[in-house]
Image: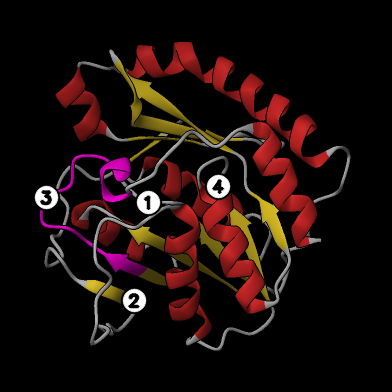
């Protein structure tokens, strides 16, 4: 049975910077938006995550856009870099706007954002009809990216879950749940930029959240980057190889 995001969300102050939850810390010099690209965002994010002094970190990127960000975080932390494969299900007429998300595994998980579904005209049947296609794409990506390599063990580790941003939170929510299945000691969600309301929901699910910026106006993740090209399969494979 797919889970749903709450329709009423507590609001975090817009524009909060370098937020670390539980507890909050704001840098004296917030990052100027937009970020130049994902690599710059990753370097800035890595500095904040490194300041936490995490024990036994493992960095999990949400492909494909999260991989260039996560590669920078893993490099600074001297941590293994791996993938957590999640596929969003887009809204009718706007495939980039997530109304739901699924993860792979023996028992695939699905999270639906009911408020976003209502706003875009999607319903449970819309999500269900596209779930199988999303899972097929996850399997294709697993075969392409991992080439038979087993995943990094997560048990007892600190998982640092990284994406290039959070818009609706559906993808990150299912990713947190999937990461928990590996029995890590804790899960840290780290993103350069996020919409405030979904981030407040995610903060209740992760053990800690690090976010560099929560703009007062948030339309889409990409508008907060000067360069935001699609990340291709070859780039993902190259970044993973370089991190080994």
Q: Secondary structure at mark 3?
A: loop
Q: Earlier in the sequence, mark 3 or mark 4?
A: 4
- Find residue 165 and name its label: 1
Q: Earlier in the sequence, mark 2 or mark 3?
A: 2
Q: CA distance from mark 3 to mark 1?
A: 14 Å
The answer to whether marks 2 and 3 mark residues whose Cβ atoms lie closer than 8 Å is: no
Q: Residue at x 19, y 34 (%)?
A: 115
Q: CA distance from mark 4 to mark 2?
A: 20 Å
- Find residue 62 and name its label: 4
Q: CA distance from mark 4 to mark 1?
A: 10 Å
- Find residue 217 and name its label: 3
Question: Over which residues does the magenta segment extend?
Answer: 211-225
Residue 212 falls inside the magenta stretch: yes
Residue 148 vs residue 173, the one in the foreground: 148
Q: CA distance from mark 3 to mark 4?
A: 24 Å
- Find residue 134 and name its label: none
Q: Earlier in the sequence, mark 1 or mark 2?
A: 2
Taking 80 as reference, is 218 left or right? left
Q: Residue at x 66, y 33 (%)?
A: 233
Q: What is the x, y in percent for residue 207?
A: 45, 72
Tag 2 residue = 21
The answer to whether marks 3 and 4 mark residues whose Cβ atoms lie closer than 8 Å is: no
The C terminus, quarter of image? bottom right
- In this rendering, does residue 180 appear at all? no
- Which of the colour schemes (rainbow, by chain, secondary structure, one colour) is used? secondary structure
Residue 144 falls inside the magenta stretch: no
Q: Earlier in the sequence, mark 4 or mark 2?
A: 2
Q: What is the x, y in percent for residue 217?
A: 11, 50
Circle 2 Cα neighbour tier, 10 Å, few/some/many (<14 / 14–19 / ≥20): some
The answer to whether marks 4 and 1 mark residues whose Cβ atoms lie closer than 8 Å is: no
Q: Earlier in the sequence, mark 3 or mark 1?
A: 1
Q: Residue at x 69, y 80 (%)?
A: 56
């Amino acid at each position: 049975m797919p889970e749903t995001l709450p329709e009423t969300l507590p609001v975090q102050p817009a524009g909060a910077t370098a937020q670390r939850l539980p507890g909050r810390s704001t840098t004296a010099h917030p990052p100027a938006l937009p970020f130049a690209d994902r690599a710059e965002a990753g370097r800035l994010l890595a500095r904040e995550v490194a300041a936490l002094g995490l024990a036994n970190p493992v960095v999990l990127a949400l492909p494909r856009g999260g991989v260039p960000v996560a590669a920078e975080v893993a490099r600074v932390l001297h941590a293994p870099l791996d993938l957590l494969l999640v596929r969003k299900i887009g809204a009718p007429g706007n495939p980039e706007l997530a109304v739901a998300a699924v993860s792979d595994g023996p028992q695939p998980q699905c999270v639906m954002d009911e408020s976003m579904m209502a706003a875009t005209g999607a319903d449970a049947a819309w999500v269900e009809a596209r779930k199988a296609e999303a899972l097929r794409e996850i399997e294709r990506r697993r075969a392409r990216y991992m080439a038979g390599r087993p995943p990094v063990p997560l048990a007892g580790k600190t998982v640092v879950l990284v994406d290039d941003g959070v818009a609706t939170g559906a993808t990150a929510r299912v990713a947190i749940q999937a990461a928990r299945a590996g029995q890590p000691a804790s899960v840290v969600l780290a993103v350069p930029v996020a919409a405030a309301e979904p981030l407040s929901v995610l903060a209740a699910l992760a053990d800690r959240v690090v976010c560099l910026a929560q703009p007062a106006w948030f339309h889409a993740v990409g508008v907060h980057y000067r360069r935001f090209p699609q990340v291709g399969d070859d780039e993902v494979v190259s970044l993973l190889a370089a991190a080994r």
